[in-house]
Structure formats: structure tokens, C-alpha cells
């Protein structure tokens, strides 16, 4: 009886070693590439990262040099690193969750590249039509010194990089804020805005869904309602009409 028990125990251990760890090694696993905004770090997206991992997504969330390279270079470098991570873990579906500049990087990348297994894209406060704040600050050398070449590409004029980007294929959900606490920049932004980007400027013709939340540009990614909606869109391809929806629907 003792020998039989030992053999059963050894068999169980062997099976556990063969089985892949949860969320890794499965060819049906879904991977999410998380891209922070201009002048931020991966830490700014940590609450989103934690929520995604808690919902069994494989997550790549690393800082990239947003203030030292232009959009074209950033898109190639950051996204290729994320794709390599997803591929090395055998992910069959690759989603994106982005904040601000991060959404522009995805659009830039998809201008010239296709992604096998591309899933859904959620953009938070993206300056898809440019930002009047960039227009205002572009004439100041300190702006370029601090925020780098990518910041200069975010203007609203027709020749700016963001205005030259063509529509991309994919399910895109956009969340932006309508609550600005910025007395310096909001006066130059037409309509409702989040302190950096107007509600209208965040939109894309090809987007699948769009919602606004009562929050600002800087902290929208830490809003639990926003995180719930991210999870809902990744699962359903649309946002919930309930801002505080449960994520296990």
C-alpha cells in the first residue's frame, strides 16, 4: 500500500511538470501589449497590467524611450519587443491597450506591418487628430528638449504625422476623458477635453466603439471604471453601457 501511494504521488508530480503554467505555453493564449504615453513609464499602466493578469491575459508592459525618439522609431522598437514577447509565449491572439502616444504608435506600426493574430485595440485618450497643446508648445525649444521629437509630431495641422496616418484594420475601442483640471491648456482646446486632447480629436472613423468618462488625461488609466471597460472590450468587442460593469460577464 505504501509503495502504491508513493507511485501515485510520483505520477501526479510528473503530470504537473508536463502541464504548462497557467497563462503560458498555450497556443490559444491571449497576449496584451500595453503602451504608456509620452513622458511616462510602464508604472503608469501598472493597474491595467495587474487587472489583465488577474483575468488570465499574458501581458507585456515595459517602458520605452518616449522622449528620445520619433514616433516611427518608437513604434518599431517598442511594438516589436512586445510582439517578440507574445510570440515566445505562443500567444495566438495579440491585443493592445494604450494611453495617449501609445495609440499613435500602434497606428503608425500598422501603416506598414501586419500582425498575425491581431486581436482588439483599446486606446485611452489618444491624440488621433493631434493636440492643440502640441500646437501651442511647438514654438518653444524647452518643449522639444524635455519631451523630444515625438512630441513635435502631435500637432493638429494637416502635415503632422498623426493627421497623415491612414485608417487601420482592426477592432478599436477608444475611451477618453471630459474632465480637465488644467487651466493653462484647456482654453486653447475646442469643445470638451481632458486637459490635453479634445473629445473629438480622440476619435477615429474606423473605431468600433467610443465612450467618455469624467476623468482627465493624466490619470485616466488608473480609473477602475476605465479598467473594467478595457476588460469588457477585449472580451466582447464593444464597451458596456454600464460604466461600472462587472468584468466576468
Image (cartoon, grey):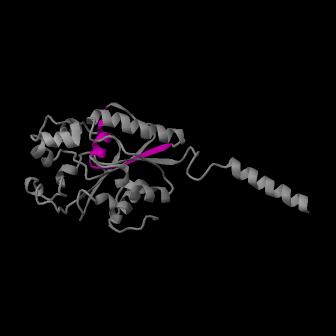
Task: Tell me if 15 is positioned left or right of 220 in this view.
Answer: right
User: Residue 218, image x and y in percent?
Assistant: 25, 57
Q: Quadrant of the C terminus?
A: bottom left
User: Is residue 125 something one can see in this rendering?
Assistant: yes
As for residue 107 lying within the magenta part, the answer is yes
Residue situated furthest top in the rendering: 112
Q: Residue at x 43, y 41 (%)?
A: 82
Which quadrant holds residue 149? top left
In the image, residue 220 lies in the stretch drawn in magenta: no
Mark yes or no: residue 110 visible. no
How many numbered marks, from 0 up? 0
Residue in the picture at 35% in, 34% down: 76
In-image side of 230 versus 100 (left or right):
right
Tell me which residue sits at (53%, 48%) in the image.
29
Seen from the viewer's position, the closer of residues 36 and 130 is 36
| Residue 136 horizontal/vertical position (percent) | 9, 46
Q: Nearer the viewer, residue 209 or 70?
A: 70
Q: Is residue 219 left or right of residue 159?
A: right
The quarter in which the N terminus is drawn is bottom right
Residue 142 percent location from the top left of the image: 15, 42
Magenta stretch bounds: 92-111
Q: Which residue is depicted at the point 35% across and 42% down? A: 64
Residue 236 in percent (x, y) is at 41, 56
Amino acid at each position: 500500500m505504501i509503495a502504491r501511494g508513493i507511485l501515485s504521488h510520483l505520477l501526479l508530480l510528473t503530470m504537473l511538470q508536463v502541464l504548462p503554467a497557467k497563462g503560458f505555453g498555450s497556443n490559444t493564449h491571449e497576449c496584451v501589449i500595453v503602451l504608456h504615453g509620452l513622458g511616462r513609464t510602464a508604472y503608469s499602466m501598472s493597474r491595467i497590467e495587474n487587472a489583465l493578469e488577474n483575468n488570465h491575459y499574458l501581458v507585456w508592459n515595459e517602458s520605452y524611450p518616449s522622449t528620445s525618439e520619433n514616433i516611427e522609431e518608437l513604434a518599431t522598437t517598442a511594438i516589436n519587443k512586445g510582439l517578440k514577447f507574445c510570440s515566445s509565449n505562443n500567444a495566438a491572439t495579440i491585443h493592445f491597450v494604450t494611453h495617449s502616444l501609445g495609440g499613435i504608435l500602434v497606428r503608425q506600426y500598422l501603416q506598414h506591418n501586419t500582425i498575425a493574430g491581431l486581436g482588439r485595440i483599446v486606446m485611452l485618450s489618444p491624440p488621433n487628430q493631434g493636440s492643440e497643446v502640441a500646437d501651442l508648445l511647438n514654438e518653444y525649444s524647452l518643449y522639444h528638449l524635455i519631451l523630444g521629437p515625438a512630441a513635435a509630431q502631435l500637432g493638429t495641422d494637416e502635415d503632422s504625422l498623426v493627421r497623415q496616418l491612414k485608417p487601420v484594420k482592426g477592432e478599436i475601442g477608444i475611451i477618453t476623458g471630459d474632465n480637465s483640471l488644467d487651466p493653462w491648456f484647456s482654453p486653447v482646446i475646442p469643445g470638451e477635453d481632458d486637459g490635453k486632447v479634445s473629445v473629438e480629436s480622440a476619435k477615429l472613423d474606423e473605431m468600433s466603439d467610443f465612450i467618455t468618462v469624467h476623468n482627465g488625461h493624466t490619470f485616466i488609466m488608473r480609473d477602475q471604471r476605465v479598467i473594467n471597460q478595457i476588460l469588457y472590450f477585449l472580451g466582447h468587442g464593444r464597451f458596456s453601457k454600464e460604466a461600472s460593469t462587472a468584468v466576468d460577464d
